Image: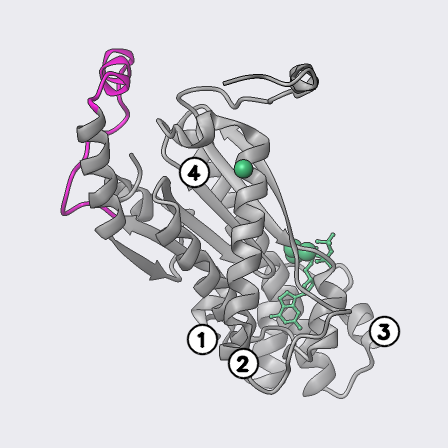
Amino acid sequence: MAKSRFEYVRTYEQDQVLLPNTYIVIRLDGRGFHRFSAHYGFAKPNDSRALNLMNKSAVSLMKQISDVCGAYGQSDEYSFVLQRRCRLFDRREAKLVSTFASTFTAYYQFYWHDYFPDQPLVASMLPSFDARAVQYPSLAELRDYFSWRQADCHINNLYNTSFWTLIIKGGQTEKEAEHTLMGSNSADKNELLFSRFGINYNNEDAMFRKGTMLIRDISGAPLQTQNPSQKDHIALQKKSKRQVEREEKKRNKAEIVESHDDIIGDNFWRESYKWLS
Ligand code: DGT
Ligand code: MG
Ligand code: MG
Ligand code: MG
Ligand code: MG
């Protein structure tokens, strides 16, 4: 193909390529959702419609991008983990984060009406999401990453539940509620909810307390050995195109399973062969 004399400008492009054989986690977070949630009247502290719309958008993205093994969402954020051997966009960071952010945002807007039928989106207050990619060298860090996000969900939700209960049921102002909770630990908040309002925090909706974990269940169709050794990894890269296509088809067909359980303890990770490859 003939090249124009302008072609050289391309050499100024710089691609950040993510390390091979690492777990790539792409975390999206709603931009300015403090204002966004207030504008569309999200229920406090948790709006099931908003959380289910996040989940719907995440499942839709996973159906579209088969390299995603699993995802965890809470509040206005979602983290997607890619297969260790993922070759999508040759692991170029900018391509990955921009595609994830725009695909997720597109689905969020597309499905908005299904979850908020009475509140049409207005042009001056449209949802958008930022995205960042992080690389983790082993399952240990990946597990700690997910634990970190779920611990964040727990801490925020226990605080927010206590805060809004003091206001809505206890008649306190926001300032007073803030003061009541100052210096309280988890046990204090559980006790406050129970003794003053008869609320057993553990009976609150699991989606609020634990967030949402999505896994692509490939256990019915094992694709490769867990934690490939160096040799396996090289072998994987030599797979024929047809083999790769076959596996991708299988991944596309695999069910995406949603749960709201603990992902910090060992139990969840004992079954990681089902979805992490
Ligand atoms: P950012 O991410 O720096 O652009 O700023 P924000 O405002 O998105 O802040 P962030 O992401 O730290 O916090 C998420 C906000 O979204 C927080 O103000 C609470 C709000 N939010 C998320 N989910 C819900 C919900 O279900 N109900 C209500 N009322 N608010 C929610
Ligand atoms: Mg945000
Ligand atoms: Mg947050
Ligand atoms: Mg956030
Ligand atoms: Mg193009």
Q: Is residue 118 above or below residue 20?
A: below
Question: In the rendered image, which quarter contains the C terminus?
Answer: top left
Q: Position of residue 239 (x, y in %)?
A: 21, 21
| Amino acid type at mark 4 | Arg
SS for tag 2? loop
Residue 235 sits inside the magenta stretch = yes
| Amino acid type at mark 2 | Ile
Q: Which residue does the image show at 67% across and 14% down from the upper left? A: 8
Residue carrying label 3: 175
Residue 225 shows in the view: no
Q: Magenta segment range? A: 217-240
In front: 229, or 240?
A: 240
Calculate the distance from the C-alpha at mark 1 to the C-alpha at mark 4. 26 Å
* Disc 2 residue crowd, few under 14, some 14–19, many 20+, Cα 10 Å: some
SS for tag 4? helix
Q: Position of residue 170 (x, y in %)?
A: 72, 86
Indicate which disc, 1 or 4, sits on the residue closer to the N terminus: 4
Which of discs 1 and 4 lies nearer the camera? The answer is: 4
Indicate which disc, 2 or 4, sits on the residue closer to the N terminus: 4
